Image (cartoon, rainbow, N blue to C red):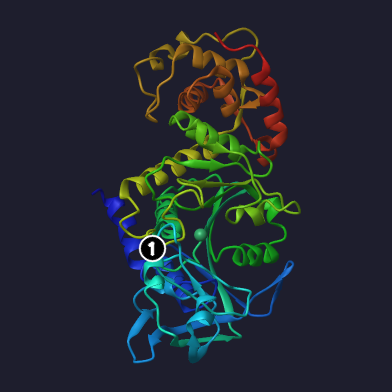
Amino acid sequence: MSGIEGDLRKHIETLFPICRSITGQGLRDTLRYIAGQIPLTMHEVPSGTPVLDWEIPKEWIVRGAVIRSLDGRTVVDFADNNLHLLQYSIPLDRVVSRSELDRHLHSLPEQPEVIPYRTAYYADTWGFCLSHSDRLAMTDAAYRVTIDTSLVPGSLSYGECALHGQEPGEFLLSVHCCHPSLANDNLSAIAVAIELARTLQQRPARRWTYRFLFIPGTIGAIAWLAANRDAARRVSHGLVLSCLGDPAPPTYKRSRRGDAPIDRYASHVLSEAGHGDRVLGFVPYGYDERQYCSPGFDLPVGCLMRSPNGTFPEYHTSADNLSFVRGDAMTDSLATLLRIIDLAEADASWINTCPYGEPQLGRRGLYSKIGGASDGGGSRFDTLTLLWVLNLCDGRHTLLDIAEHAAKPFSAVAAAARALHEAGLLRPERPGPELLRPDASAVTAAARDESPVP
Ligand code: ZN
């Protein structure tokens, strides 16, 4: 097991037993753990605070929950598995008939051995989740139900880690951390985000500010957006991260815009890895992209996953456990994210300083850098790539536009641009975020419509 794989595994193993919810001590303990790994600012938003069209709920405190037979035998116990209790269950302590109890039980007849994960955040109710086989074995006329919980004015917690960059734009990375003992959804993404932040911390010259949000799903994103109404002006790129540890290849779900730079970057990286068929269109369902891509904000935020939510049998059940999540899948997710980020960092417009006729390449030692030679950044390029970069560096094309138009790997185009820059044949056109926004994509779309490169 590589060092990074061991670190990723350690994060999910440490966090797995904690009973998280959208508020409460489990969420706070999770954020404290993350704060021990990366610089994290903790926020507490008081219960009752209006946030956009919502309100911060009461804090849920859970001490235990048990169903016992009337002769005192334990039948279902929250202490055995925190999925057993319907999240946000109200307190209860009384004898309940089997038929009444049945209306409060949740199981999966088609998967009789697993415990489902269910929530009732905004409903005044209680319930238990159990395997269907255990439910069928409950044949007594009545049971004693004890739910030791409280719903009290408290706060909603979330964590924010900002790694500042040189340009005003921001790259938002949003991770929900409100699920109890479920490993893929979403401890895998918490673990990958921690290691991504650590990796980016080591890079001294970051172009973008990387803002990591560790938030409870839906209400946390809404609370953050309510406090950051100007986010639309800052967020140049964004990704919601979820389910990054299962064995499936990566999946990217486009932002509502569909053709934002992040959509192009993620699609390009997945296509290069042979997973172009796993780029999905935007749907107003899923994770917190629903909030970031609500029409009033319409942020360029897509979603990176492996298996999409609801498409794998382990989803939201006790089978989404530590043995379901794979270290090599989390490592691959981290590498995929870094490739997307490398693209976002390097994609820019450059200007050919010698655009009248072709410049003499041999005189500047450029032919020696072509072919087998590496440019020092670890990437190679051929003569045609160099010529494409010279030809299209007119301020109207970014390096990704050139890579797509010339059907060359982005890394080769970026390496050719570095070599040309070192030779004095390219100068940066300070891109500013506006050159990376949809009008730049429109130029590319037009360029792509032209006849293919031979
Ligand atoms: Zn979920």
- Residue 353 visible here: no
**Percent from the top left, x then y, of residue 251?**
49, 41
Q: What element does badge 1 sit on?
A: loop
Q: Position of residue 148 (x, y in %)?
A: 47, 88
Q: Residue at x 75, y 51 (%)?
A: 295
Instruction: Give the side of residue 327 with respect to residue 25, left or right.
Output: left
- Place residue 428 in its image quadrant: top right
Q: Nearer the viewer, residue 27 or 211?
A: 27
Three-letter amino acid code of the residue under disc 1: Val
Is any part of residue 430 visible from this angle?
Answer: yes
Position above or below: 138 against 204:
below
Percent position of residue 80, x then y: 34, 76
Task: For ligand 1, tell me if the residue under mark 1 lies within 8 Å.
Answer: no
In the displayed structure, 194 sits above or below 404; it is below
Q: Residue furthest left?
A: 1
Q: How many marks?
A: 1
Residue 298 placement (x, y as % from top left): 71, 49
Q: Residue at image x 59%, y 40%?
A: 262
* Residue 415 as seen in the image, left or right of residue 226: left
Q: Is residue 445 above or below residue 153?
A: above
Residue under the point 40% across and 79% down: 139
Left or right position of 301 against 131: right
Q: Quadrant of residue 451?
A: top right
Can you say whether 36 is above or below 145 in the image?
above
**Which residue, given by chain and number where applicable, does mark 1 sit on?**
114
For the C terminus, the quadrant is: top right
How would you rate the neighbour count of disc 1 (Cα within 10 Å): few for under 14, some for 14-19, many for 20 or more? many
